[in-house]
Structures are given as C-alpha cells and as structure tokens.
C-alpha cells in the first residue's frame, strides 16, 4: 500500500467511490441477462432468461437479437464465429456462424449447467448443479462425465492453459485439476460461503468471489486461500483480472469493484445502476461490459476510472497542479493540472493518514491542460490530499477538505 509522507492530524475515513465512466447501453430486452462474452472490444454476446441472446459488432452501440433454446447462464466464444452456451436442463447449444444459428448439443445430463468454457476448438468443460462436470474433446459433439467428488452446485470454471483449471461453487468449494480434468482435487478455502466466480491471472495468482462480498485470494495456485477486504456486502457474481494487479468484480445492487494492487484494496466504482449485475467481461485492459437484471448492459471504455478531459487547446510551459474547486466541497470537486510534454502521469488521492485510497489517473498523457471531476459521496468528512506524480516521482501535492 502506497503511503504519502506528511504530518497531519489523523482523521477517520471510510470507503470511497469515484465518479466512474460506466454507461448504460440499450439491450432491447426486459429479460435478465446472466452472462456476457467478447472476443474483442467490439464483438460480443450477452445471454439470459427465456433463450435471450444479444449480439453486437460495434461495441454495444447496437445489440441484435438472436434466439437461444432456453434460459442461458453461461456463454463462451473462442473466435468471432464459434461459441457455446449452457443453461437449465443440461442445455448446451453451439454456433459456428457468430450466433446466426444455434444448434443444441447433448450434454448427457438434465441438471442445470451454470458454466461453460472451451480451451480450444475441440476441448471444453461444463459444470453445474449437483457437482456435475462434463468434458468434450470434439467441440461439443459428445460430452463425458468427470468426477469432482462433490455434490455442491458448481458455478464457474476457469483454466490457465490446456491442463490447469479450477471450478468454484457452493459451500466454499474450489476444485483444481492439473491434467485437464482427469482428476479434480478439492482445495481448502476455510469458508462455507458460496463462490460464484473464480479467475486466475496466471497459474499462481487467483481470486474467488461470492456471497455477501466474499473475496478470497491465492498466490500459490490455491494451496492457500486468504480473505481480502471487500467494500460491499453485496453478492459478488463475477470476477476478472486483466493482469496480476488489476481486476474487477460485479455483483448485486449495481456493485462494481476495482483493484490495482492484487486486491489489497478494492474500490467501489459508480456503475450508474442499482440492478443486480451477473456477468462481467473485459476484452481489453480498459474496455469492459457487465450485464444483469431487466436486460441491463453497462460499459466502460476507461476501466471505470474518473473521466479526464482537456480544458483547452493551449500548451502549458510547466507541470502544475491547481487547487481543487470548490474547496471545501460536498461531495463533488474539480481537479485541474497541466502537462507540458508527454509523460507518464499518476494522480492519487490520499487520506489524512497518508494512505492511498484512489488512483484517478495512471496513463501517458499528451501535452495539455486537464480537468477531473471527482465524486467523494462515500467518503467521511475530513482532510484529504491529492498528488501529481511524473514518471513515478511525486511532483505536487495539495490539500482539500470534504464537509458534509
């Protein structure tokens, strides 16, 4: 955790929420959407109740209806043409033409399948209620059972490479395989709460999320799972990490969480919706989508960070960080700074104890004058500081006061 060194009176603070750039898209359906998957920033699918499938090729500007066989809880594509979806009654359906046609496959079970994933055009896995695990080695033409030695509902599958994978489920269940599912072994998670999603950034670092904001973390492939602090008590339904540092989670009541330090700190972002969000997918580092109840689809193109905009066309002569305005403020304030030449810029908020609580900017900016509108609606009243870093070195620091 980064700490800014200064001497001030210690003030108590609570979690924050920046004014994030998640915006609502029109899905064209009132039905719940459970899953979303993109093969690139523009081409993706969302799936949900009553066979609802929506398809876009322009980043969600338009969502085109497609017809699925029944309710669908999971969807996965390996390229823009070929994908699979799964749902209640053991349903598995596939397409080889971007979803223009969906063809049912025989899973061999009648229980609900809640997750489907393919690691190649031929090899895939599905899992669901009653501890059911199925595997295909021929693109889904046939599915064979695998043994997980559990009767708990299995909600999410994740693989790193062809052989190493995990399945997370109810009652704190996490299963792991090192041989493409020939054997699945249970891991000790020290919780009986449900996991709804699991994701690894490599074979060592992974996260599982679930009931009442539960977040568990491992740095050794799941030999040990440690609890991380969540800023919400909402159910977390989906988690994805872009790399070993930056990850996102989505959950009920519109909860969107983000971390940039492997989960040491999770910050709640402003999603703009109060609906339950079920599916989450980032096809790139900054572009992400989340789907939920009543056909909700939200999107970000800047990682959900605070929006930064140029102030004018004038080129400044030196780096500067202006005093925020208004100051004192409640709860929104503006922060302006100047960049005379292209530079890696970080703008960070600290509490009165010097602890980093939010990164507003972390990117290479072109020369110009910039403005950020920051929303501290979920902060406690008190003194805060914001610092401008140039190529990792602190340049300017200013104080601001939140009064509620």
Image (spheres, helix red, strand yellow):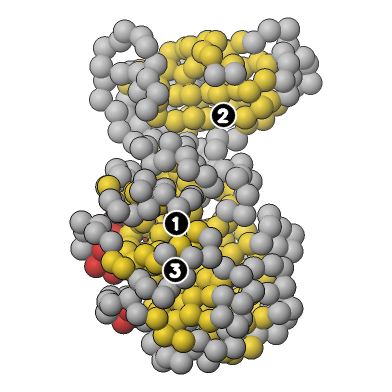
Q: Secondary structure at mark 1?
A: strand
Q: Residue at x 55, y 10 (%)?
A: 395
Q: Which residue is mark 1?
A: 199
In front: 80, or 357?
80
Identify the image quadrant of the C terminus: top left
* 252 lies above or below 116: above
Identify the image quadrant of the N terminus: top left
Q: Residues within 10 Å of mark 2 (few under 14, many from 20)?
A: some
Residue 39, quarter of picture: bottom right
Residue 326 visible to the viewer: yes
Q: Position of residue 254 (x, y in %)?
A: 43, 55
- Foreground label between 2 and 3: 3
Tell me: 126 left or right of 285: left
Q: Which residue is mark 2?
A: 361
C-alpha gap between disc 1 and disc 3: 18 Å
Tell me: 47 left or right of 78: left
* 157 lies above or below 377: below
Q: Residue at x 24, y 59 (%)?
A: 188
In front: 329, or 367?
367
The number of numbered discs placed on residues in the rendered structure image is 3
C-alpha gap between disc 2 and disc 3: 42 Å
Instruction: Answer whether labels 2 and 1 touch (C-beta < 8 Å).
Output: no
In front: 174, or 49?
174
In front: 299, or 286?
286
Q: Residue at x 57, y 68 (%)?
A: 119
Upstream in sequence: badge 2 or badge 1: 1
Q: Residues within 10 Å of mark 1 (few under 14, many from 20)?
A: many
Q: Residue at x 45, y 24 (%)?
A: 349
Q: Which residue is mark 3?
A: 179
* 316 lies above or below 270: above
- Foreground label between 2 and 1: 1
């Amino acid at each position: 955790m980064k700490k800014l060194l200064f001497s001030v009176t210690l003030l108590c603070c609570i979690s924050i929420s920046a004014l994030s750039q998640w915006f609502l898209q029109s899905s064209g359906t009132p039905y719940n959407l459970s899953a979303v998957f993109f093969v690139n920033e523009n081409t993706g699918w969302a799936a949900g109740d009553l066979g609802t499938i929506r398809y876009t090729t322009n980043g969600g500007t338009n969502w085109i209806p497609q017809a699925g066989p029944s309710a669908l809880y999971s969807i996965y594509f390996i390229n823009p043409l070929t994908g699979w979806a799964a749902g209640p009654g053991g349903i598995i359906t596939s397409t080889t033409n971007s979803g223009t046609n969906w063809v049912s496959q025989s899973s061999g079970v009648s229980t609900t399948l809640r997750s489907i994933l393919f690691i190649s055009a031929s090899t895939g896995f599905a899992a669901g209620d009653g501890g059911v695990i199925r595997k295909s080695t021929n693109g889904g033409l046939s599915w064979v059972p695998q043994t997980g030695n559990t009767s708990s509902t299995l909600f999410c599958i994740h693989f790193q490479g062809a052989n190493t994978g995990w399945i997370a489920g109810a009652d704190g269940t996490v299963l792991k395989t090192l041989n493409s599912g020939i054997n699945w072994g249970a891991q000790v998670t020290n919780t009986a709460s449900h996991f709804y999603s699991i994701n690894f950034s490599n074979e060592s670092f992974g996260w599982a999320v679930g009931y009442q904001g539960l977040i568990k973390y491992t740095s050794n492939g799941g030999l040990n799972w440690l609890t991380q602090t969540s800023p919400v008590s909402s159910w977390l339904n989906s988690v994805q990490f872009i790399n070993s540092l930056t990850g996102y989670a989505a959950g009920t009541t519109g909860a969107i969480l983000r971390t940039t330090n492997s989960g040491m700190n999770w910050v709640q972002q402003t999603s703009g919706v109060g609906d339950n969000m079920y599916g989450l997918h980032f096809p790139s580092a900054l572009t992400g989508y989340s789907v939920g109840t009543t056909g909700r689809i939200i999107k970000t193109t800047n990682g959900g960070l605070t929006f930064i905009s140029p102030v004018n066309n004038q080129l400044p002569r030196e780096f500067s960080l202006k005093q925020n305005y208004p100051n004192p403020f409640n709860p929104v304030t503006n922060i302006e700074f100047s960049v005379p030449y292209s530079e890696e810029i970080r703008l960070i908020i600290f509490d009165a104890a010097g602890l980093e609580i939010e990164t507003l900017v972390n990117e290479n900016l072109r020369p110009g004058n910039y403005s950020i509108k920051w929303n501290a609606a979920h902060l406690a009243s008190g003194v805060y500081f914001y610092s401008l870093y140039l190529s990792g070195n602190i340049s300017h620091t200013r104080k601001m006061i939140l009064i509620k």
